[in-house]
Amino acid sequence: MESAALTSLIEIEGKNFTLETSPVSGKNRLSSLVQLGGRAISHREVELPEGLDDDSFKHYLQETHRIRSVELESLFRLNKKIDEKPTADACWKIGVIFLSNGFYEDSRQKFLKAIEMDPRHLQAIKNYGIALTLMEDYDGAFASLNQARELGPSFADIYYHIGNTHLYKRELDEAVQGYLQALQINPRYADARLRLATACVGYLAQSSNQLDGGKVLELSERAKTEAETAATLNPKVRNRAFLMAMDYLRNKKYSQAFQAFIEVRPKYVPRIGDEIIFFFTLTLLYGSEGIDLQMTEQYIDKLTKVIEEYPHYADLHHHLGTAYLIKCRFDVSRSLKEFKKALEINPQFQKALNNSTDTEDLHRKVLAVLKKAIIPQG
């Protein structure tokens, strides 16, 4: 399996991208690498399902490669449309999509554009800091995230990302402070608990030889407790890297445990459902081909699966409700079309006259509600 790889050349907006999808050696993952002019500009890894035989693996590899190709073409086409008529909100959302796809420089430019258009756009400022963290510009990241903290001091994820900036610099005291502040706001923040466990292991990796036995035990037990709590709050945490990290920790192999804990979760994970919601919403607002019934049904299916996993997120239910309104619009339009066909056959058909009038009124009301639900107000 590890020798298999698929490579495609993709031309987008006059640029020739190379996409390579291949297994990651020694890990149960697929790597998606995008290069431009021989330079890697995006790298993303996805977990492979367990128990694939050779044929199933080949099919999964081919499908992952195909979907990634389509995603890239759609993303850059949409980006061009936004460039023609940008808003701060649209730049922030397409920036999040770029960020989740590993295009850090593209995301940085989009967040910067959003901030230029709206200097107090909290989400753009926060995500600008995240992008800089991933690009290893830690000083710039810290400055941006601190600005976001001043604008939104009650947002737990801002403190979490500040903690990450320090963790990646191996500034463990400051990292722990960031995670504790995040958990004070949201005690159920699974990734913050996981990174707090990582920081505890970091202390052991750096200084276990200088610590007394009691302190080593305390840090080890705290790491185990926080990691297990994180896995309970979010079962996706309990992956292969997590199990390896816990095994290394039990066997006092602290350096290996620290590295394994770092790899349990990606360095960036978008807020639940954001990538799906933002792409659909921006395509609705900017896509030249528009949204058809099939795209809407696919979006509803994706969002429904997210909600099945995270049923207590109110905004996800709101977005799903909006999606059903969009689907309803297709049905209302089809109803209106049929009533008008009936009137073409018999202009005096009273029921068709009444229903046509009522349906036109319903269509206007649906459009009005959709406008409020989709287009940012104020």
Image (cartoon, helix red, strand yellow):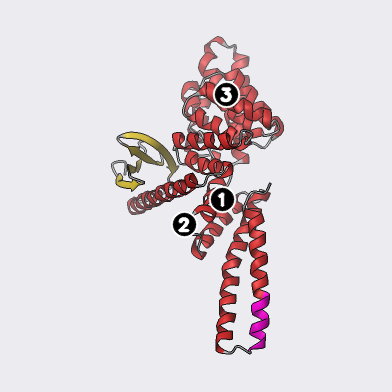
On the question of residue 193 being in view, the answer is no
Q: Amino acid at mark 1?
A: Ile
Q: Residue furthest top?
A: 210
In the figure, 110 relative to 311: above or below? above
Q: Which residue is mark 1?
A: 277
Q: Which mark is residue 124?
A: none
Residue ID at (66%, 33%): 156
For disc 2, the neighbor class at 10 Å (few under 14, some 14 to 19, many from 20) is few
Is residue 53 highlighted in magenta?
no
Q: Quadrant of residue 126?
A: top right
Q: Position of residue 8 (x, y in %)?
A: 30, 47
Residue 141 lies, with reference to residue 54, above or below; the image says above
Query: Which residue, given by chain and number where applicable, does mark 2 sit on?
Result: 288
Q: Regarding mark 3 in the picture, which secondary structure is present there?
A: helix
Q: Is residue 206 above or below residue 7?
A: above
For residue 142, which numbered disc appears in the image?
3
Between disc 3 and disc 2, the foreground one is: 2
Inter-mark Cα distance, 1 to 2 = 18 Å
Element class at badge 1 = helix
Please name the amino acid that badge 3 sits on.
Phe
